[in-house]
Image (tube, helix red, strand yellow):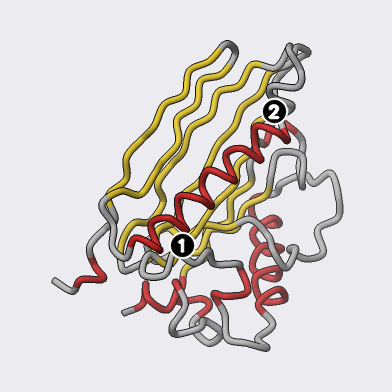
């Protein structure tokens, strides 16, 4: 088995405070240590930013539950989502979800553009696929969907790139997060071979 195929070891840490129940992941026993440190720093910063964005602990009314989900942990690519649900009174709370995708050899965080060949129109290609899918699924939108953001939320799950939209970003609250899984094979011509999607091919 190639060294790269080994998944990284993840430990879950729990933080329990008044009005806060938080579970977050940390990479442990990983070499090189610089990569482990880079990934863990990014995760902690993202968790803290979510808490801040949800008004915790600034708003004494805010009750937060936060956790994570592993999406991919193979072939030198770690992809996970961080969830944060905050309730401050009213009809319902709000959940935000942020995804992080790492190169486990270097600890580098991938941006969406890093998945594709330089200069390729990944925004256009992904947007067309999503537009067609919105039509097929008959999703009533709050706003007219023209294109994804260059830094649209995404994660990698095995041989799929999953583009997703936050609650309210495209559709009403009842629709929650909108997910658009796209097979790597549909993107074959624009994928960066040395990027995380390229690694899923091999």
| Other-residue count near label 1 (Cα within 10 Å), few / some / many at <14 / 14–19 / ≥20 | many
Disc 1 is placed on an element classified as: strand
Rendered location of residue 46, percent (x, y): 59, 45
Q: Residue at x 53, y 43 (%)?
A: 44
Say which quadrant the C terminus sits in: bottom left
Circle 2 sits on which residue? 94
Q: Quadrant of the N terminus?
A: bottom left
Q: Position of residue 198 (x, y in %)?
A: 42, 79
Picture coordinates of residue 117, whole percent (x, y): 57, 86
Q: Nearer the viewer, residue 78 or 14?
A: 14
Depicted 128 relative to depicted 94: above or below = below
Please report whichever mark, 2 or 1, sits nearer to the chain's N-terminal start.
Answer: 2
Quarter of the image for residue 135 reads: bottom right
The label on residue 83 is none
Q: Say few, some or many: other residues with alpha carbon within 10 Å of mark 2 (under 14 / 14 to 19 / 20 or more).
A: some
In the rendered structure, the answer to whether residue 155 lies left or right of residue 26 reads right
Location of residue 199 with respect to 91 vertically, above or below: below
In the image, which disc is placed on residue 102? 1
Q: Position of residue 60 (x, y in %)?
A: 73, 13
Which mark's residue is nearer the viewer, 2 or 1?
A: 1
């Amino acid at each position: 088995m190639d060294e790269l195929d080994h998944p990284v070891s993840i430990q879950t840490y729990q933080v329990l405070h008044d009005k806060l129940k938080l579970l977050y992941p940390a990479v442990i026993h990983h070499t090189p240590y610089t990569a482990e440190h880079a990934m863990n720093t990014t995760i902690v910063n993202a968790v803290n930013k979510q808490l801040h964005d949800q008004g915790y602990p600034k708003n004494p009314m805010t009750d937060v539950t936060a956790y994570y989900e592993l999406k991919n942990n193979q072939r030198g690519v770690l992809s996970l989502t961080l969830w944060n649900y905050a309730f401050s009174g009213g009809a319902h709370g709000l959940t935000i979800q942020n995804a992080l995708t790492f190169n486990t050899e270097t600890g580098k965080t991938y941006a969406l553009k890093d998945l594709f060949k330089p200069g390729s129109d990944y925004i256009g290609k992904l947007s067309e696929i999503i537009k067609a899918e919105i039509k097929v699924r008959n999703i009533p939108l709050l706003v007219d969907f023209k294109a994804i953001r260059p830094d649209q939320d995404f994660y990698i799950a095995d041989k799929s790139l999953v583009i997703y939209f936050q609650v309210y970003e495209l559709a009403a609250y009842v629709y929650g997060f909108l997910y658009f899984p796209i097979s790597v094979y549909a993107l074959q011509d624009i994928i960066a071979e040395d990027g995380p999607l390229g690694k899923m091919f091999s």
